[in-house]
């Protein structure tokens, strides 16, 4: 019964280990493909990701590709760097983040913002409460707009904004379209179906001569009412879809479609000249992941990875396990007979018990009789003739015990005692 239970335990343990290993393998496959990340993430290897472009840039000699998973407010000097935002949404953003990006570009970086493709004008946010688009980012509130005469709804919106602005933990949300001088607009794509966005061709308007004359475009979004500083590079039906403007020592590029960065485009419709122009002369390309919701939260494990403290953590775990083991299991072997333990650990023993214990430790059961006889001879020294007959009888009893297949030292001891008793009785009668 015990063996059957032990077999079941081993079988369940093996099944549990195999299940855990397969589960880990499944998660590793998902992470390797990257479909757990949002579209246009550099971690995705499926058609909706941009991992192919990231790997290609990383493999080029003299180029460096990296991912930004920290808040953009922590970006350092952007000189000689291109920062790519793929799959961005046309929503409001925190003011401190936009200011940080502007400083980053002003120092010499090239900022490329490629928006998520839309088949039509999206409903990204509630006009009053704000919300999230696609579950990836928080969309900032829009200021309430009253009519030209200032209706009641507009007044209520201004009062509500003042109340929210008074809270110290509130984040100020701004629109890059207002700060950078353009507006979002939408025009339906031709050939749209229930399963296809449709597509059109964007025609080159300006830029270097090596740029392609036509580029496939898959988004209804375009840019309208551009500031004079913007230059239209590509347009579809005279609607700007790829624009550029200088900003300090750097430049800002806006693209209304992220398809040209995707893995699918790298396979089916690769445009290396256009991609090279978008990246510019930078030798370091940074793919931002924070706008897609992939943000590193500093913690203990982050510090462990950063300072390579894996050995210290492993040592602490081993010491903790040894401590638990020491307190849970005694290192001294347990005796099966508790009564023997209690007897051996009593308060005290008499002389007979000590002698018995000493004999048990020093003399085996088969030689105890011979040892006793030898001690008797050394003590009484039977040299006289009256002890010779008894000594011979005692020796005969000892020899019989040693030859016996079933020795009985106790019975032999009683026989020897009887021989000595008769000898003592006869000596008393003679006296």
Image (cartoon, rainbow, N blue to C red):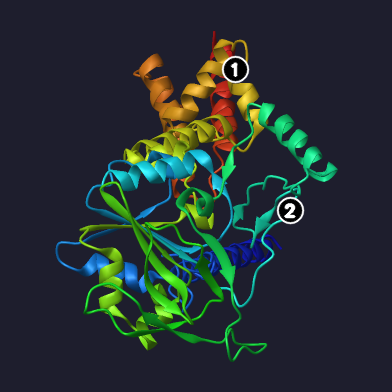
Given the current orientation, which residue lies at the most extreme top position?
Answer: 431
Q: Secondary structure at mark 2?
A: loop
Q: Position of residue 273 (x, y in %)?
A: 25, 77
So how many labels did they put on this image? 2
Q: Quadrant of the C terminus?
A: top right
Residue 185 vertical position relative to residue 194 in the rendered view, above or below: above
Please name the residue that numbered disc 1 is placed on: 425
Q: Position of residue 33 (x, y in %)?
A: 46, 72
Crowding near the residue tagged with mark 2, few <14, some 14–19, many ≥20 C-alpha atoms within 10 Å: few
Q: Position of residue 11 (x, y in %)?
A: 61, 67
N-terminal of the two: label 2 or label 1?
2
Q: Are marks 2 and 1 in contact (CB under 8 Å)?
A: no
Quick check: can you spot residue 109? no
Q: Secondary structure at mark 1?
A: helix
- Quarter of the rendering containing residue 212: bottom left
Disc 2 vs disc 1: which is toward the camera? 2
Q: Nearer the viewer, residue 100 or 408?
A: 100
Residue 166 horizontal side relative to residue 238, left or right: right
Q: Nearer the viewer, residue 180 or 67?
A: 180
Q: Nearer the viewer, residue 222 or 61?
A: 222
C-alpha distance separating marks 2 and 1: 127 Å
Residue 53 vertical position relative to residue 294 in the rendered view, above or below: below
Residue 197 vertical position relative to residue 344 in the rendered view, above or below: below
- Quarter of the rendering containing residue 71: top left
Please name the residue that numbered disc 2 is placed on: 127
**Residue depicted at x 78% and y 45%:** 149
């Amino acid at each position: 019964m015990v063996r059957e239970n032990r077999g079941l335990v081993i079988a369940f343990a093996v099944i549990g280990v195999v299940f855990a290993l397969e589960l880990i393998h499944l998660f590793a496959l998902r992470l390797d493909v990257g479909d757990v990340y949002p579209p246009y993430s550099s971690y995705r290897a499926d058609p909706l990701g941009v991992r192919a472009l990231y790997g290609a840039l990383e493999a080029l000699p003299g180029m460096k590709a990296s991912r930004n998973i920290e808040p953009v407010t922590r970006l350092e000097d952007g000189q000689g760097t291109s920062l790519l935002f793929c799959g961005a949404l046309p929503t409001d953003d925190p003011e401190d983040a936009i200011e940080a990006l502007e400083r980053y570009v002003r120092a010499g970086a090239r900022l490329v913002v490629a928006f998520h493709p839309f088949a039509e004008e999206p409903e990204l946010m509630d006009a009053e409460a704000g919300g999230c688009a696609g579950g990836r980012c928080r969309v900032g509130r829009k200021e309430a707009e009253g009519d030209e005469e200032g209706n009641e709804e507009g007044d209520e919106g201004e009062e509500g904004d003042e109340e929210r602005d008074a809270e110290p933990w509130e984040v100020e949300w701004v629109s890059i379209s207002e700060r950078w001088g353009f507006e979002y607009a939408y025009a339906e794509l031709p050939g749209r179906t229930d399963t296809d966005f449709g597509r059109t061709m964007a025609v080159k308007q300006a830029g270097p001569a090596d740029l392609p004359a036509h580029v496939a475009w898959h988004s209804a979004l375009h840019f309208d009412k551009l500031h004079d500083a913007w230059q239209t590079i590509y347009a579809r039906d005279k609607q700007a879809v790829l624009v550029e403007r200088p900003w300090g020592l750097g430049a800002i590029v806006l693209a209304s479609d992220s398809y040209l960065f995707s893995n699918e485009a790298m396979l089916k419709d690769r445009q290396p000249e256009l991609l090279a122009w978008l990246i510019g002369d930078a030798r370091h390309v940074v793919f931002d992941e924070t706008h897609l919701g992939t943000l590193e939260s500093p913690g203990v494990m982050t510090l462990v990875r950063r300072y390579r403290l894996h050995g210290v953590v492993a040592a602490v775990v081993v010491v903790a396990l040894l401590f638990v083991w020491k307190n849970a299991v005694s290192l001294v072997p347990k005796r099966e007979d508790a009564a023997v333990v209690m007897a051996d650990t009593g308060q005290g023993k008499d002389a007979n018990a000590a002698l018995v214990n000493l004999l048990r430790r020093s003399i085996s059961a088969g030689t105890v009789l011979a040892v006793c006889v030898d001690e008797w001879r050394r003590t009484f020294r039977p040299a006289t003739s009256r002890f010779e007959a008894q000594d011979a009888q005692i020796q005969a009893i000892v020899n019989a015990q040693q030859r016996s297949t079933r020795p009985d030292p106790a019975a032999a001891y009683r026989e020897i005692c009887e021989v000595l008793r008769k000898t003592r009785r006869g000596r008393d009668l003679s006296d």
